[in-house]
Amino acid sequence: MLVALAIFSLAALALLRLGGATATNSARLDDQAMAQIVARNIAVETLTDPEPPAFGAAGGVTIDGGRTWRWSRTVAHSPEARIQQIEIAVAPEAGGPGRASLIVFRRAPM
């Protein structure tokens, strides 16, 4: 009886540890997914702006999903002279694991 109780308690502890790990991973994935959505929103704003962005770095803060995000955008020449390469990086302003980066391309100003 004691052996069966010991085995059951070990199995219960393993299930509790697994539940905690699952909750932690779920929160981390939620942060990353939200950061990707913010990066895509900034990319859409950049791509739909009538004027192409200036070459160089820019950054700012945006509120999305009820949280504050810090973003940076680096515009550089791509291998094709008529195309801009735009790299967008997003991170939560408060810090944490939710980070995302995205590279998009747009026609360069003539």
Image: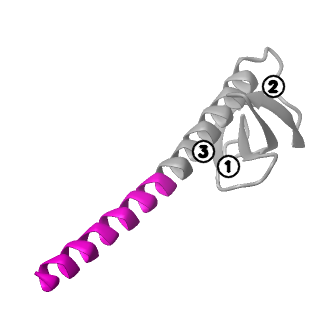
Viewer-nearest of labels 3 and 2?
A: 3
Q: Secondary structure at mark 2?
A: loop
- Where is residue 79? Give x, y as percent: 67, 49
Viewer-nearest of labels 1 and 3?
A: 3
Residue type at the position of mark 1: Pro
- Where is residue 57? Give x, y as percent: 88, 45
Q: Which residue is mark 3?
A: 31
Q: Does the residue at mark 1 contact the one at mark 3 (Cβ under 8 Å)? A: no
Labelled disc at residue 79: 1
Mark 3 neighbour density, 10 Å: few (under 14) some (14–19) many (20 or more): some
Q: Which residue is mark 2?
A: 52
Spatial CA distance of label 3 from label 2 is 30 Å
**Majority secondary structure of the magenta segment?**
helix
- The residue lying at 14 percent from left, 85 percent from top is 3
Does the segment drawn in magenta span residue 24? yes
Viewer-nearest of labels 1 and 2?
A: 2
Front-lying residue, 50 or 95: 95
- The picture quadrant where one finds residue 12 is bottom left
Q: Secondary structure at mark 3?
A: helix
Q: Is residue 22 left or right of residue 41?
A: left
Magenta region? 1-25
Residue type at the position of mark 2: Pro
Does the segment drawn in magenta span residue 92? no
Labels 3 and 2: the sequence-earlier one = 3
As drawn, the residue found furthest toward the bottom would be: 3
